[in-house]
Image (tube, helix red, strand yellow):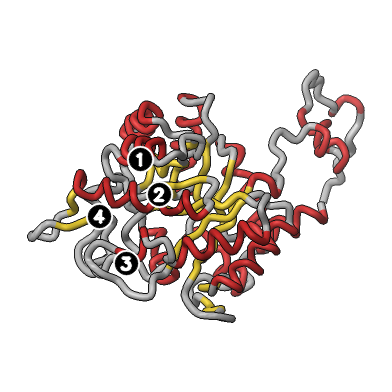
Amino acid sequence: MVERVFTQTNTIDLPVRPRRLRATAGLRRMVRETELNPADFIYPIFVTHGKNVRNPIASMPGIAQLSVDEAVREAEKTAAHNIPAVLLFGLPAHKDPIGEENFDPDGIVQQAIRAIKQELPELVVVTDVCLCEYTDHGHCGLLDDHGQVLNDETLPILVDVAVSHAEAGADIVAPSGMMDGMVAAIRAGLDVAGYSRLPIMSYAVKYASAFYGPFRDAADGAPKFGDRKTHQMDPANGREALREAALDVDEGADFLMVKPALPYLDIVRQLRDTFPELPLAAYNVSGEYAMLKAAAANGWLDEERTVLETLTGIKRAGADLIITYHALAAASWLRKL
């Protein structure tokens, strides 16, 4: 084998060498363009009836359905990790065609709001506003005799839900049903009820995604028949996302959201560039969480590095806020960096 000798003549004259700024950890930190912070996170919590209840969700390792007392403990952990907000989903005691517990002043989410705000008044409580977890058919709106979702007839129910959450002490309401006109209806309803200062975080761009599977186990919200393709967006569409977001901005949305996150980072970037004045959230959904947890459990991926890389990518794409089930773990890992 011939030994190669590298001399001065082998040096290439390169005035720009990007590797110079990657040479040490200190240099890399100095030029880092995107910094992940626990303040970027919103932590979802599933609340159910009972006391001292923690029902593990098999498809979402580390996540459980929690009774109100346990939800308060989880919220305390959230605050201790410097995460500013939780997002509440409710599992009702019973279901019916219109989801009456959804707007009951003593419904499960309303109980959780009051309990969390009593113990943690500075923690921001965001509430999901939809029908699917509460209806016996599992759809996001009222149905006609043919099983079709009724848009306009659903809006007053969503208003009642949002107002009941506001009365219980919610800081932000987040309508997720993808009903046309839902933001305008809820804004008007909140204003009439005296909650004109309460912000709306709109699930403005919510795709009919296969990544929701574990969530439907967690929230017991899978449709009993059919699917949600008539109101959630076609995954193939991008321009439609801008149209949906623009409508919600015109109707009074205070935040916009893209759901899911990872398969739609291009949409996150488009919304960031098109609506720079509004805070933008991205929902790192249950399927995205579950696939990383499964890969890590099998030793195929380094969980810490993969999760932090994923969340950094979502923020780099343009998200100001990330709704994620990884929030507690990610906040702990960030403390070590």
For the image, the number of numbered tags is 4
Mark in front: 4 vs 1:
1
User: Could you say whether the residue bearing mark 3 is in a helix, strand or loop?
Assistant: loop
For residue 222, the mark is 3
- Can residue 62 be seen in the rendering of this structure? no
- Numbered circle sitting on residue 141: 4
| Secondary element at image label 1 | helix
Q: Position of residue 161 (x, y in %)?
A: 37, 53
Q: Which residue is mark 1?
A: 189
Could you say which disc has been placed on residue 294 in the image?
none
Q: Is residue 222 visible?
A: yes
| Mark 2 and mark 1 residues within 8 Å of each other at the beta carbon | yes
Distance from Cα at disc 4 to Cα at disc 3? 13 Å
Is residue 216 placed above or below 140 in the rendered structure?
Answer: below
Mark number, residue 162: 2
How far across and down, in percent of the image, does residue 8 sit?
A: 91, 26
Q: Of marks 2 and 3, which one's residue comes earlier in the chain?
A: 2
Q: Is residue 213 left or right of residue 273?
A: left
Q: CA distance from mark 3 to mark 1?
A: 28 Å
Mark 1: few, some, or many residues within 10 Å (few <14, many ≥20)? some
In the rendered structure, which disc, 2 or 4, sits on the residue that comes first in sequence? Answer: 4
Hey, which quadrant is residue 327 in on the image? bottom right
Q: Residues within 10 Å of mark 2 (few under 14, many from 20)?
A: many
